[in-house]
Amino acid sequence: MRVIFAGTPEFAQAALAQLQAAGHDIVLVLTQPDRPAGRGMKLQASPVKQHALAHGMPVAQPRSLRLDGKYPEDAAAAQQALLAARADVMVVVAYGLILPQWVLDVPPRGCLNIHASLLPRWRGAAPIHRAIEAGDTHTGVAIMQMDAGLDTGDTLLVESLPISPTDTTGSLHDKLADLGGRMVVQALAQLDSLVPVPQPTEGICYAHKIEKREAAIDWTQSAETIVRRVLAFNPFPGAAAVLHGETLKVWAATVSDVPLPVNAVCGSIVAVAQEYIAVAAMKSIVNIQQVQRPGGKRLAVADFLRGCDVQPGMVFESSADVPEAR
């Protein structure tokens, strides 16, 4: 088919590569404008743009698609490009812009979206993070026929995937990106025979965008909740804890099976071993296993302790009052 592809991050790039490998003609790629990134804050092309340029695909980067919006000249140029592409179908994956109705109406076979959840659960921007944070045991990918709503369209294909107890957002992202690419290729091959299925009206929830402020570990939560958030925020934004004024990123942690000492204060270090730093949470203990100091590398606790004096009784700081853990 002649395909317009709209996407921006690595998750979308994986689908673009699989569509290309399947022999589809990518006649236009839409992606977000280049953004400052890295320590030097130099403009950097999105993973989708990098792949498209490397394979000779035409690229457009409108700041908006709203003809009556802030950048009408961008939207008008995009409209001309979309119409000139004469595509059969449009595939949208984590693009980052809302598609107005005129875009949805351009391709005669419609717009297909790859969404990394079992819709209608976790509609929205961060379905992988939120599934892990919530403790879901399964997630998956839905291929959806897009409409004007936010992830509300009929589903064409749905496939479930288990979430491992050790899955981070990074590891689950890679599994779902591969699955989504394979499923959209399957959907295009079977487009004439697929039956659109309306989403259930029950079980709807939204995966709101991850904010950096969510990184701070709240030691008044249970160990299970804290560990899920450590997994969910790896690799972004990274769970953070402050010890002696230094902000440490916590990249790996588990729930301890050791009982919490009586009267232990939330955030206090109750034990230090070669493999972990045990920290009191609400009615439970978190064993920190991998940390990172500012400007440093991720380190196993054994390596971290060689350069940092950590002792039982020290307390991770909090801006809020810290209650007793029991």
Image (cartoon, rainbow, N blue to C red):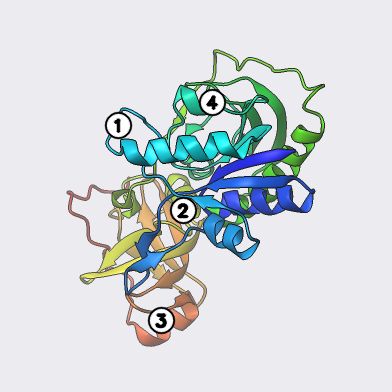
Q: Within 10 Å of the Cα at label 1, are there few (<14), some (14-19), or many (20+) other Cα atoms?
A: few
Marks 3 and 4 sit apart, C-alpha to C-alpha, by: 55 Å
Marks 2 and 1 sit apart, C-alpha to C-alpha, by: 58 Å
Marks 4 and 1 sit apart, C-alpha to C-alpha, by: 17 Å
In percent of width and height, residue 321 lies at: 17, 49
For residue 320, which numbered disc appears in the image?
Answer: none
Label 3 or label 4, whichever lies nearer to me, is 4
Residue 304 location, quadrant: bottom left
Q: Is residue 187 above or below residue 281?
A: above
* Sooner in the amino-acid sequence: mark 3 or mark 4: 4
For residue 259, which numbered disc appears in the image?
Answer: 2
In percent of width and height, residue 182 lies at: 75, 44
Do tag 4 and tag 1 residues touch (Cβ < 8 Å)?
A: no
Do tag 3 and tag 2 residues touch (Cβ < 8 Å)?
A: no
In percent of width and height, residue 190 lies at: 81, 29
Q: Residue at 32% of width from left, 52% of height from top?
A: 212
* Sooner in the amino-acid sequence: mark 3 or mark 2: 2
Q: Which residue is mark 1?
A: 69
Do tag 3 and tag 4 residues touch (Cβ < 8 Å)?
A: no
Q: Which residue is mark 4?
A: 104
For the residue marked with disc 3, what is the amino acid? Leu
Q: Which residue is mark 3?
A: 305
Q: Residue at 63% of width from left, 14% of height from top?
A: 198
Q: Secondary structure at mark 3?
A: helix
* Sooner in the amino-acid sequence: mark 4 or mark 1: 1
